Image: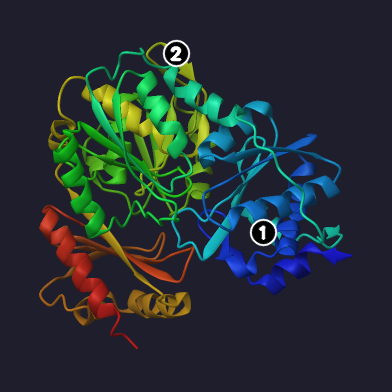
Amino acid sequence: MLKSIDVIKESGIQFGTSGARGLVEQFTANVCAAFTHAFITCIKKDFDFKQVAIAIDNRPSSPAMAQACAKAIEQLGLEVVYYGVVPTPALAYVSMQDNIPCIMVTGSHIPFDRNGLKFYRPDGEISKSDEQFILNATAEFNEITELPKLIASNKASERYIERYTSLFNNKMLAGKRIGIYEHSSAGRDLYVPLFEELGAEVISIERSDEFVPIDTEAVSDEDKQKAKLWSKQHNLDFIFSTDGDGDRPLVADENGDWIRGDILGLLCADAMCIEALVVPVSCNTAIESCELFSFVKRTKIGSPYVIAEFNALGEKYNSVAGFEANGGFLLGSDTEVNGIFIKALPTRDAVLPALMLLSKAKQGPISELIKVLPQRFTHSDRIQNFATEKSIAILDDAKMSQQEFLERLGFNGYIVKSINMTDGLRLTLTNNDIIHFRPSGNAPELRCYAESDMLEQSYFLVKKALKNIQKFQ
């Protein structure tokens, strides 16, 4: 017999900001089984269920990982419900409606040589305390020696599409030309019929047979140029895409300009008349300065921290939601849209913010909606293969001497006005520029976020900061 705590510790896999992540070679069949047994042990004390749902993204390693998780579920005497390749929010939504737990096999946006597992209780995402329980559980199980065959159901896809098409008139997007940048997104087979059902003319763009690690917070220069080209070439009103598992949107306006995720979230929340918002500390400060919301709470980066605030705010406000700088929108309460109630979905979703933006724009250009917001511009990028331990050490030193740290980055003449250590190190300067460093919770990466009154300045801050911090010893 194997013990989950021993197998998980030996694997070296830990939880990041969203799920357990690691190299594909670390996710052996027994490691997947260990996480599954520990997860079920964690939640069975609070929930009664006979089924567990599983879905995957398009990574080459995901099917075998799902089979290992399924075998573990069978060992526990539970029934496996398999949905194949679908977006994470589709799996989460149908599982919550069926009141059963689920496991999503995905590494989201990280490279294909890595993968991960996301866990959902019948009432939504697991908490940070659940993560610790899973890591330390002592569930016993037999070694995985053979993998079961899995047959996919269409139920999750169908319910997810219906969730959104039921909110709008089927002519809402009539006359609109929408491009779907499909790449290897887990939801690529759902988006064309969804937008077509709402009346749009849809053009499929760049479907890939190889996994493409799209990061909605660090859009590549290549993808920026592609979007402008696609917009002109196909005369598009809107471009829609997502990250690998379909929970983070990547959308572009009629000019082919990608819209920052937190600006998209702001516009979505406004269109839904949300009263109280929860957002990570890295999001654009226009959220407060636009004065559209009754209350805004800032948290550490990661959906579990956002979700943790929903219950308390739900007791004070009629509608609660959250979003992240990556664009994922989390609906924290049942909310009315067009006279129809939409159920809460407290996990990142890509489709809702895209549709609410299109609904809000109606017959006008999307770019005009952005122009009326407070003009604060954000940019972010990352250094890949930058050891987390090194990032932490640099930022620990910087917290003790912020001004010296700023000058070492090459920003002579700039002065630190205030610091925020909610997550990483966020420096607000006397000219109101913001520079924020944070080690990624999912991979050996150092992220830098910047905000300024000018777009060019935000790019300058990130580029200079990341270039110079690499010289630190």
Locate residue 219, reporting x and y percent. 29, 55
Residues packed near mark 2 inside 10 Å, few (<14), some (14 to 19) or many (20 plus) = few
Q: Amino acid at mark 1?
A: Gln
Quarter of the image that includes the N terminus: bottom right
Q: Which mark is residue 415?
A: none
Say which label, 2 or 1, has the lower sequence index: 1
* Label 1: which secondary element: helix
Q: Is residue 330 visible?
A: no
Q: Is residue 463 visible?
A: yes
CB under 8 Å between discs 2 and 1: no
In the rendered view, tell whether residue 471 sits above or below residue 184: below
The answer to whether 158 appears left or right of 200 in the picture is right
Q: How is the image coloured?
A: rainbow
Quarter holding residue 83:
top right
Locate residue 291, reporting x and y percent. 24, 34
Locate residue 323, reporting x and y percent. 39, 41
Q: Which mark is residue 340?
A: 2
Q: Which mark is residue 132?
A: 1
In the rendered view, tell whether residue 67 sits above or below residue 350: below
Quarter of the image that includes the C terminus: bottom left
The answer to whether 321 appears left or right of 132 in the picture is left
Residue found at the far front of this picture: 209
Residue found at the far right of this picture: 1
Q: Nearer the observer, disc 2 or disc 1?
A: 2
**Residue visible at 12% across and 77% down in the picture:** 412
Of 398 and 184, the residue lying toward us: 184
**Residue visible at 58% across and 37% down in the picture:** 91
The answer to whether 330 appears left or right of 407 in the picture is right
* Label 2: which secondary element: strand
Distance from disc 2 to disc 1, alpha carbons, whole Å, reads 38 Å
